Image (cartoon, coloured by chain):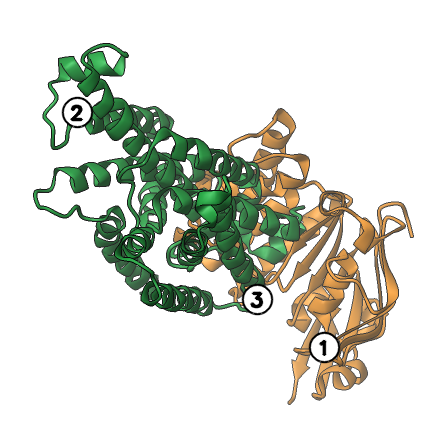
Amino acid sequence: MIDRLLLPMLVLAILAALYAACLLGSVPLPPARMTAALLGQGEPGDLLVVWQVRLPRALAALAAGVALGISGAALQGLLRNPLAEPGVLGVSAMSALFATVALFYGLAATIPFALPLAAIAGALTATTIIAWAAPRTSSVVTLILVGVGISSFSGAVMSLLMNLAPNPFTLSDMVTWMMGSVANRSFNDLALCTPFILTGAALLIAARRGLAALSLGEEAAAGVGLNVPRQRLLVVLGAGLATGGAVALAGAIGFVGIVAPHLVRPWVRHDPARVLIPSALLSGLILILADITVRVMPGDTELKLGVVAALIGAPVFVTIALRRGTPR
Amino acid sequence: MTAQGLEVSKASLAVKRAPLIEGASLSLEPGELVVLLGPNGAGKSSLLRVALGLVRPDSGEALIGGQPAESLSSRDRARAVTYLPQVRDLAWPIRVRDVVALGRFAYGAAPERLGQTDAEAIVQAMAACDLIELADRATDTLSGGELARVHIARALASQAPLMLADEPVASLDPRHQHSVMRLIRGFVDRGGGALVVLHDLDLAALHADRLVWMADGRTVTSGTVADTMTPHWITAIYGVRATVTERDGVTRVLVNG
């Protein structure tokens, strides 16, 4: 009963959150004027605030959240561990690094798709390393350490690039990529990145039946008729495309990919196939809400979205890790 | 070999130059329960994986229904042979009925999307394994014996003519060991063929139609319980002395160390 209501409830909550995101902000906009602006009427100023600033920003948060939520859930299914996630496994960091290189060398400004493509290349590099390492180690701890290694490596190169940054503007750009933010996103940015996110999500949804089979372990999954190498490829590609798209749009935002599936799982009876779509929606919702929080917080400098996500997500990560440590 | 049988002939497999199996042969036909015996590290699991076509042998061949096992698609293989590896733990605490439903994976079914035939096969398998009352339980709340039955039900749900089970009774108490073996016996009596890896010689003697003995990667001998469950072969395979007695048609093995 409740699992049937889960999706409609999440969709409604997302619509409400998008509405709230248009409503709230530094410029007060009464609901009537905001609604008029949303419908394309009203004063030019209102139209600008809603259509150029608040709505694209909220949609960017939604898109990034959807990508990270579905990638997290799919990677967890593939690696059979609830701690797997693009952020923890270093996928976001590697992706952000590649995006930064594209920005640093000015590729992003000259070639239209350079930024998302670089971010995706980074994400795919990291997911490939992880999927390569996964069957070679039975321990997920090892795998997470591989992720920590990828993260640290990316962080180090990133610091180097920051040291070499030619001017403060480039530097602040880079910080944005590292921390994750959807400030100043436009519909153009969305149009550039969402196709990749949707393609990745579609691949992951196509692979979801295999994720259910993988609950049995790789050996038995192969036994029930799953083509395991193909499944691994699908998830790596899907998660790489979606995470890359999310990083190109919003930078490296960690931990949402852990929190959302963790919350959703009991509602779908822990089925790793059924967890995908609700995780995507919930994680989108979380990022819209987190971004609203970022915007309405008083202060001169805006908090980064990724920081808020980590402030919520990291404790959840630690909790799950500790709970798994206790024998049943 | 019949159209549904399985056969491995003179297969060898090595990993990093360490031989896992060497010239091992094996056959399984519908209607027989074959028990594969041998000490730890004898290559029993590797032989099963070769028989299934999950790994290609370095030499020799493995056939399923007359076709090279490794050339079968994952789906066709799963429809011909159902496989129970040693690992029984599930990654997620999913429901019993969802685990059993995974037995229908090769028919395009998913736990949330079941056709009429799938649903019937699942209910039948759960009924055969006495799981109807546990159907909605999460698997992490089950005992080891119950979980073993869930996996048997998953195998039965696939309705494949053959079953390969790698130590299906490991770490179960005697009652559950016998209940699992009875379920496999029932599958064979209905026309299935089962190859079961066991370590318990009494259990093997009680249930097997045929024994295959393995040591150091080789299939040393094969035959009926009466012919091969002898002190000679037990010493040759396990390196222990044993006394074999038979009373009222029940073979007992006493290992003297």
Query: CB of mark 3 within 8 Å of CB of mark 1?
Result: no
Question: What color is chain A drawn in?
Answer: green
Query: Which quadrant holds residue A283?
Result: top left
- 10 Å crowding of disc 1: few (<14), some (14-19), many (20+): many
Q: Which residue is mark 1?
A: B42
Q: Which residue is mark 3?
A: B170
Identified by mark 2, the residue type is: Leu
Front position among marks 2 and 1: 2
Quadrant assignment for the N terminus of chain A: top left
Question: What color is chain B drawn in?
Answer: orange
Whether B25 is drawn above or below B195: the answer is below
- Left or right: where does residue B244 sit relative to residue A236? right
Residue at horizontal 23 percent and vertical 52 percent from the top:
A307
Whether B196 is drawn above or below B122: the answer is below
Residue at horizontal 24 percent and vertical 29 percent from the top:
A54
Residue at horizontal 90 percent and vertical 50 percent from the top:
B66
How many discs mark residues in the rendered view? 3
Depth check, front residue: B166 or A95 = A95
Front position among marks 2 and 3: 2
Q: Is residue A74 visible?
A: no
Residue B184's x, y, as percent?
67, 52
- 10 Å crowding of disc 3: few (<14), some (14-19), many (20+): some
Query: CB of mark 2 within 8 Å of CB of mark 3?
Result: no
* Residues behind callouts 3 and 1 on a single chain: yes
* Residues behind callouts 2 and 1 on a single chain: no
Identified by mark 3, the residue type is: Ala
- 10 Å crowding of disc 2: few (<14), some (14-19), many (20+): many
Depth check, front residue: A51 or B11 = A51
Callout 3: chain: B
Q: Residue A23 got which mark?
A: 2
